[in-house]
Amino acid sequence: MNVQQIPNWLKQRAYLTPDRPAIKSNGVWVTFQELHQRVLHRANQLATLGVKKEDRVGLLMKNSFDMVIMVHALMYSGAVNVLLNNRLTSSELMWQIRDVSASYIFCDDSLEGEIHKLEAIDVVTHSELLSTIAADTCTIVQEFASDSVATIMYTSGTTGHPKGVLQTYGNHLWSAMGSALNLGLHSDDRWLATVPLFHISGFSILMKNVIYGMGIVLHEKFEAKQANRAITEDKVTIVSVVTTMLNQMLSELGSSSYPEHFRCMLLGGGPAPKTILEQCRDKKIPVFQTYGMTETSSQIVTLSADYSLEKLGSAGKPLFPCQLSIKKDQKLSAAFEEGEIVVKGPNVTIGYWNRNDATLESIKDSWLYTGDLGYLDDEGFLYVLDRRSDLIISGGENVYPAEIEGILMSHPAVTEAGVVGITDDRWGQVPFAFVVANKSISEGELLDFCKGKLATYKVPKAIKFEKVLPRNASNKLLRRKLKELIEEGHHND
Ligand code: ATP
Ligand code: MG
């Protein structure tokens, strides 16, 4: 393969447009030149500590300016950033740290307690870095090779144990370019980073920041009011959100609307219920639905706002450098025929860390088998249905839990819903729903509501009310845990 050498991104950016505002955090803007200087200093500190090229270095940090500095400083050192989800439990974290055999972990002071000391790992807290580590002058990496691994990011662990995804410099560069060729790049663009930087959704904003030379506004955590305020006051033009965030932003917005300059609400990470898309349409909010995963280094398929009415519910078409097809029994599916979503592109991972079996199973002939089900319409627009592992087959019909969950959640009394299949003598499997309600409502009323909106075979056999539903550290619903609840016999009445 022809390996491209690309100039060190931030250094190049600081050389090209030194005075441009780069990041606003804690109310202060820094320029690309200032950012580069801070990163250089940190890279020198890392050299003093002994961080070497190709070391795998864990970052256990909350969104902060300092985390941005660490990410770039590790790139300057030639080390591999291992982004750790700070919402994981201590044992989940330790599993990942051992799995990746990290040499160092850099963590926020408040998170140090989550890490058990292991002999092979140096744990360095933020305050140690600031107070005690000198900055020797080091040689920084001048060029990034497109095929070298920049980051290892674990999948959310929704379907099983998380897997460490290897993302190369080439993957991140192509991801940023593919996104720009899709969304366009305006001279006044400003992207709000309020999703976690340890996820690809947030991390990809950091890459776009330096590759595009575009300012970003960084929030330490998501707060709907602050996010809406950033759109108005910081002149943010693009925001990345998942459904729950968008819901909160909409209710916070009330009857007001977003200013003209706001051009893109990039909505991804999971299924987008039609009701929220319709609400956005009514409020003239430009929603771009997008489909992607850790393995595709962010977006791979996106629906531009031009089509949001006509193709409501679709995740769109592939980004320019990417390809998409639907496969069933090793054959390409025809339009409207459901099958596994298979993707290819320069932003797609080269494989999983330490999981050759999973790599061989998922990547064949450079095509990534996503484990998600969907179909293409006759114009090539993708509709994501659900994960293959969660499909319910009832009387020979495919039933997608996400569709039923979407209907349940469109009821005003329902805040959360989770649907799984249970065995049934007559139909093989039937859907069973778990619901969290915010007002009193009976099972019968909710079932009647479903009957008006779903074909009979999709209506849950029963609905069980719960206080909370099991979710992972990325806040994704864990249907496998719901299945376990049923298997344990708790709900088989
Ligand atoms: P694991 O791979 O460990 O089970 P995960 O797949 O949840 O975890 P991520 O990479 O964070 O880990 O999430 C990507 C997944 O999110 C996709 O494979 C898909 O199932 C879901 N997803 C992303 N975008 C959409 C979308 N627009 N519509 C429906 N599902 C989506
Ligand atoms: Mg996955």
Image (tube, helix red, strand yellow):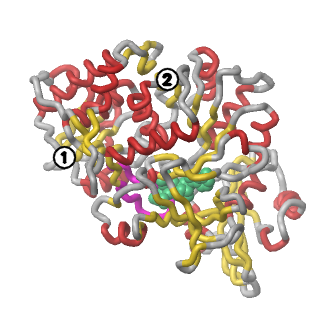
Other residues around mark 1 within 10 Å, as few (<14) / some (14–19) / many (≥20)? some
User: Do labels 1 and 2 touch, CB within 8 Å?
Assistant: no
Q: Is residue 422 above or below residue 205?
A: below
The label shown at residue 54 is: 1
Separation of residues labelled 1 and 2 (CA atoms): 30 Å
Which portion, as a residue range, is magenta? 151-165
Query: Which quarter of the image is occupied by the C terminus?
Result: bottom right
Q: Is residue 192 above or below residue 380?
A: above
Q: Is 202 on the left-hand or right-hand side of 47?
A: right
Which percent across, then down, holds residue 190?
Answer: 53, 24
Secondary structure under the numbered disc 1 in the rendered image: loop
Residue at figure coordinates x 31%, y 56% from the top left: 95
Residue at figure coordinates x 35%, y 56% from the top left: 164
The picture quadrant where one finds residue 383 is bottom right
Which percent across, then down, holds residue 49?
Answer: 12, 33
Q: Amino acid at mark 1?
A: Glu
The label shown at residue 217 is: 2
Residue at figure coordinates x 25%, y 44% from the top left: 145
One can see residue 220 in this view: yes
Q: Is 177 on the left-hand or right-hand side of 465?
A: left
Secondary structure under the numbered disc 2 in the rendered image: strand
The picture quadrant where one finds residue 115 is top left
Does label 1 point to a residue whose CB lies under 8 Å from ligand 1? no
Q: Nearer the viewer, residue 95 or 280?
A: 280
Q: Nearer the viewer, residue 31 or 242?
A: 31
Of callouts 1 and 2, which one flags the residue occurring earlier in the amino acid sequence?
A: 1
Which percent across, then down, holds residue 453?
Answer: 86, 60
Query: Which quarter of the image is occupied by the N terminus?
Result: bottom left
Q: Nearer the viewer, residue 231 or 121?
A: 231
Q: Amino acid at mark 2?
A: Val
For the stretch drawn in magenta, the main secondary structure is loop
